Image: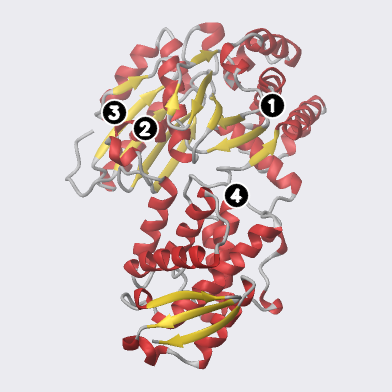
């Protein structure tokens, strides 16, 4: 592939997996990876590797055709840098080297054939990049293999690989579920990486497991369709995996339209592996991660200072800069709400504070929308935003805070009950307080900098006062006073405006 004219800092990863071959183009290599293009071709390279030792000819041809298209796509998008990786099927097949040589000539880039432990490490780093303070076992289920590795915070231990990928398991068992179950049971019993999972989180990485999550979301009527961060109690996930196996026995999985045709036959094997992981590891929760090997590869290349940044805060800062009237105003709003929290002595954990700061950064992103629809539009944007390092509960808190800022706090403008149900009542109350604070701040400032630092909070008994410095007193009006009194009532105080 000829290197395109340097347009940008855009970067692409070509991921040659055992089931799919994928191209993902990111806007730039940073702590907040923004996908600008994503395409996959389900080629099934690993379909027969376990029994024949070879990549199937038709699968090779499909993959090479996909790579030619990916090369052209990189050229027309003027991608700055292209990285290419290959996983289990290519490292295990006898004709893997020949295929890789052809693929490299097409791509014009060196293809790194990942070892099992290397693939496990990159999967774990992907979870580190996309989950805030992860603590548990990462399991990356591909078409050819299953990688397992322990992660805590940003510390990653050594990982291992097992031939339990969905295609590999289908191949080894000759499509017999009973035989597949014996294989899975024998491979997973006594695995040291699973013994450390008791009571922790199991992070499920890989397209077929994401397909399981999609089915669970639809069947449970869950209000959010975002795969990343979707969590299920392990006991519920075990029951769900067993139900999928029963459906397979009656051939009902063929009717599941939410999953691509090529993936449906693999769902049972993915459910079987998940079932036995839960039985052996006994985790507390299953969390699905869309961040995996590709994101881990790029995260590993970042300078230490960039890796240390909070991915969610970086994403919020980017949206603030793109969509708000004044990016600097949001920083002043963070300091202003910090002062409010201190003065009224609101209880906050570190995570509460982090989410409040993110909500401040996103508090003005709906200003271009028609006033009648700003609340619902920003709620949808935040709930469905393509960013990580936040739980679904955290998304709901941030989205509700900004919703209340735009829609107000009256009963006729309540947010959808399904979204409110994602947070406990106390968290919804904190979102209301924060939304009320935003309503005061943005009314005072019109999103202009230099105003909030000239206002101060003071308490006297059960009274909360907002003090305006002399140079800003002309901004005081009845509407400002009304909104501030509403805020004060929400924190159990009487409110008043003071002119210094």
Residue that numbered label 3 is attached to: 106
Mark 3, mark 1: which one is toward the viewer?
1
Residue that numbered label 1 is attached to: 271
**Label 1 close to label 2 by CB (< 8 Å):** no
Residue that numbered label 2 is attached to: 14
Mark 1, mark 2: which one is toward the viewer?
1
**Label 2 close to label 3 by CB (< 8 Å):** no
Count of number-bearing discs: 4
Q: Earlier in the sequence, mark 4 or mark 3?
A: 3
**Label 2 close to label 4 by CB (< 8 Å):** no
Quadrant of image for the N terminus: top left
Q: Earlier in the sequence, mark 4 or mark 1?
A: 1
Q: Earlier in the sequence, mark 3 or mark 1?
A: 3
Q: Earlier in the sequence, mark 2 or mark 3?
A: 2
Q: Residue at x 67, y 79 (%)?
A: 410
Helix, strand or loop under label 4: helix
Near mark 3 (Cα within 10 A), the count class, few <14, some 14-19 or many ≥20, is some
- CA gap, disc 4 to disc 1? 23 Å
- CA gap, disc 3 to disc 1? 36 Å
Residue that numbered label 4 is attached to: 392
Helix, strand or loop under label 2: strand
351 horizontally vs 257: left or right = left
Task: Compare residues 488 and 177 and report the one nearer the observer.
Answer: 488
Compared to residue 70, the image places residue 136 above or below, namely above
Q: Position of residue 262 (x, y in %)?
A: 60, 32
């Amino acid at each position: 592939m000829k290197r395109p004219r340097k347009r940008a800092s855009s970067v692409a990863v070509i991921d040659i997996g055992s089931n799919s071959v994928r191209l993902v183009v990111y806007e730039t290599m940073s702590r907040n990876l923004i996908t600008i293009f994503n395409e996959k071709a389900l080629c099934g390279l690993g379909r027969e590797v376990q029994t024949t030792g070879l990549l199937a000819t038709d699968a090779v041809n499909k993959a090479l055709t996909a790579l030619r298209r990916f090369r052209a796509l990189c050229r027309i998008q003027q991608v700055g840098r292209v990285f290419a990786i290959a996983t289990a099927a290519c490292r295990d097949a006898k004709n893997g080297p020949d295929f890789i040589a052809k693929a490299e000539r097409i791509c014009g880039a060196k293809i790194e054939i990942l070892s099992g432990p290397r693939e496990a490490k990159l999967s774990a780093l992907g979870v580190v990049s996309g989950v805030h303070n992860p603590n548990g076992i990462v399991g990356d289920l591909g078409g050819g293999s299953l990688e397992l590795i322990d992660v805590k915070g940003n510390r990653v231990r050594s990982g291992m690989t097992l031939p339990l990928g969905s295609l590999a398991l289908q191949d080894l068992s000759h499509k017999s579920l009973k035989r597949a179950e014996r294989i899975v049971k024998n491979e997973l019993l006594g695995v040291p990486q699973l013994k450390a999972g008791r009571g922790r989180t199991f992070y499920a990485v890989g397209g077929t497991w994401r397909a399981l999550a999609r089915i669970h979301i639809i069947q449970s009527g869950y209000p959010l369709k975002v795969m990343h961060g979707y969590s299920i109690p392990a006991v519920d996930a075990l029951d769900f995996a067993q139900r999928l196996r029963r459906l397979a026995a009656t051939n009902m999985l063929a009717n599941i339209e939410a999953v691509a045709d090529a993936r449906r036959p693999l769902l049972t094997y993915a459910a079987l592996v998940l079932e036995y992981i839960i039985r052996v590891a006994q985790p507390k929760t299953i969390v699905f991660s869309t961040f995996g090997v590709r994101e881990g590869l790029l995260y590993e290349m970042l300078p230490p200072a960039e890796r240390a940044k909070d991915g969610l805060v970086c994403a919020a800062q980017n949206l603030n800069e793109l969509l708000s009237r004044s990016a600097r105003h949001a920083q002043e709003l963070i300091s202003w709400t910090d002062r409010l929290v201190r003065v009224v002595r609101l209880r906050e954990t570190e995570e509460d504070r982090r989410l409040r700061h993110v909500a401040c950064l996103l508090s003005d992103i709906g200003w271009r929308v028609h006033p009648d629809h700003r609340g619902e539009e920003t709620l949808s944007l935040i709930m469905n935003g393509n960013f990580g390092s936040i739980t679904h509960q955290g998304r709901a808190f941030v989205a509700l805070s900004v919703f209340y800022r735009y829609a107000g706090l009256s009963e006729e403008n309540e947010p959808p009950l399904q979204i409110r149900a994602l947070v406990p009542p106390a968290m919804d109350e904190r979102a209301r307080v924060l939304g009320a604070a935003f309503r005061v701040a943005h009314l005072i400032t019109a999103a202009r900098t230099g105003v909030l630092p000239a206002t101060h909070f003071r308490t006297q008994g059960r009274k909360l006062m907002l003090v305006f410095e002399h140079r800003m007193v002309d901004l005081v009006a009845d509407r400002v006073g009304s909104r501030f009194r509403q805020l004060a009532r929400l924190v159990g105080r009487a409110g008043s405006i003071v002119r210094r």
